[in-house]
Amino acid sequence: MKPWVAILAAVVLLPVFVRHAIATEIWIFAIFGLGLNLLMGYTGLLSFGQATFFGSAAYVAGYLLKYYGINLFLALGIGVVVGAASAALVGYLCVQRSGLYFIMLTFALNQMFFFTAYQWTTVTGGEDGMPGIPRPSVLGLDIHGPLAYYATVAALFLLSLWVMQRIVESPLGKILKAIRENELRAEALGFDVPRMKLVAFVVGGAFSGLAGVLYAMLFGIVPLEAIGFVFSGNVVFATLIGGSGSLYGPVIGSFVFIWLSESVSAMWARWPLLLGVAFVIVVLFFRGGVVEAWARFWTWRAARRAPDRVRIDAPR
Amino acid sequence: MPLVRTERLTKSFGALTAVNEVTFEVEEGSLHSVIGPNGAGKTTFFNLLTGQHVPTSGRILFDGHDITGTPPHRIAHLGIARSFQRTSIFPVLSILDNVWLAAFARQASWRGLAWRPADRYPELTRRALDVLGEVGLGEKAGLPAREISHGEQRQLELAIALAATPRLLLLDEPAAGLSPDETQKMVTLVRTLKGRYTIVLIEHKIDVVMSMSDRISVMHFGSVIAEGTPDEIRRNADVRRAYLGGIVAP
């Protein structure tokens, strides 16, 4: 319950302290991270191609928004479906292999999608991106204003977080963790491991797709980078910093990552250096990211306080 | 009719024939042991039965159906469960979850797979706790599996296999690496399973095997060189040679 209170507070307070566009981007990126975390954190599949699903959904829904003026629900639905479908395609090929080959496949397929978008200039606009994506109003409500759009995205983020919580606390969540821990035994118990990995891909892809559409509507453009490998790397990066394998890790990671990249970059052009340092610290000392660091801090404090209490009680 | 039957089952890895034309039957409700020196092909034979390896030739019949070449996860659904010689558990998950997953996998329907909270399957949780109680881990159910001793992990290994309510239980050296005390406990435990499950047991401790098996098969260099009741095996000259051959002078 406590994390939910903190997140609700953050949702309310964030637009007070941060520019609305950045605040919105934080929650979009968090949705993106939630999807990756199911793969990377829970199933142990390091996918370096999440932008494939993010970008595909952004292009398809963006195109339909721009030229056919579809409504918001349809756009979001199409984003989710395109994200899931592209993930099913990519996932089907990738789950046949494991380890390094798996990672390289996700990366290579991402590059394939990237170059398709790059070359297909009549539709995607190539390097210039696909501009002019509208934000349709929903149920008579205008979400053009930055704050209105922020509220929409925040609501969808909370919904996504709730759905992801249900998933990781369901039997599927346990099965995916079991696959991460010991694939051979999971199979011997009667779980079709490749099929379960594919399910993780499709669910992760659906989340990425949702994030992709929201991203396109936020900036009114689908930039080519949205389907590029740097984007895929960023979400891995953010999730690792926040803490992969815990539900709230990617949310914290997204906050740290977007906030650093948007605010510090304005002051200091070499800001990725900071991210690099953060990354090294995480990998060396806190494999569970900020979430683990936080938990360790509290156990450390509790351990330091415990002897004090003994001393106070002793004279009695 | 035997519950499981193999016909001239063979598995080769390149030039090595690990399992060589093994024909073997287990009667329902019996405890059938497989013994033999290290490298005789016992574990490979198990891996064939559970689908981890695909046989080079030969057939496996389970309950009258040909299951040769069926992948491991399907074999599990038919009701064949195994324990591993080298402890194979889910270290970070709780002991309860280790066993709970085995019980879940065997359910006929996976309704609520991705949506229903895992703690709202009372019948599965009860089943898992029962099994843990049976192997003597009831009080440690909440601990992560990596935090218990090797002996307890062996008990967990067995519990995971039992939680699947198997029709055929394959136990691969359940007492591997245990102290004499722990071995005694494990033997007592396996003895309580006898009669309730159809069991195939791989074991090195000959006295244990002799005292509790209904039938024994002896493997040597991939082949079954003898099969019979414990008394028959004790008297068999080939078996003595296989076990003592390297030591006794000609």
Image: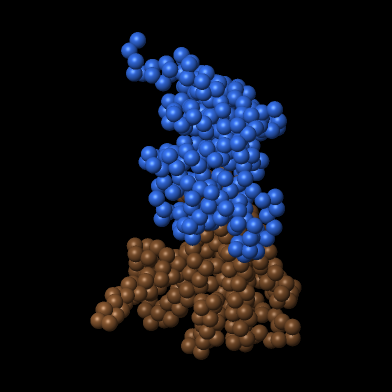
Chain colours: A brown, B blue
Can residue A6 be seen from the camera position used here? Answer: yes
Residue drawn where x is 48% and y is 57% of the image = B139
B12 vs B123: above or below: above
Can residue A222 be seen from the camera position used here? Answer: no
Q: Nearer the viewer, residue A89 or A69?
A: A89
Residue A204 location in percent, x, y? 59, 62
Q: Nearer the viewer, residue A107 or B55?
A: B55
Q: Quadrant of the N terminus of chain A?
A: bottom right
B231 vs B72: above or below: above
| Residue found farthest to the top | B250
Residue drawn where x is 61% and y is 67% of the image = A166
Q: Nearer the viewer, residue B221 or B183?
A: B183
Q: Quadrant of the C terminus of chain A?
A: bottom left
Residue A255 location in percent, x, y? 48, 76
B19 vs A161: above or below: above
Residue A142 location in percent, x, y? 69, 86
Residue A215 location in percent, x, y? 59, 74
Residue drawn where x is 59% and y is 24% of the image = B24
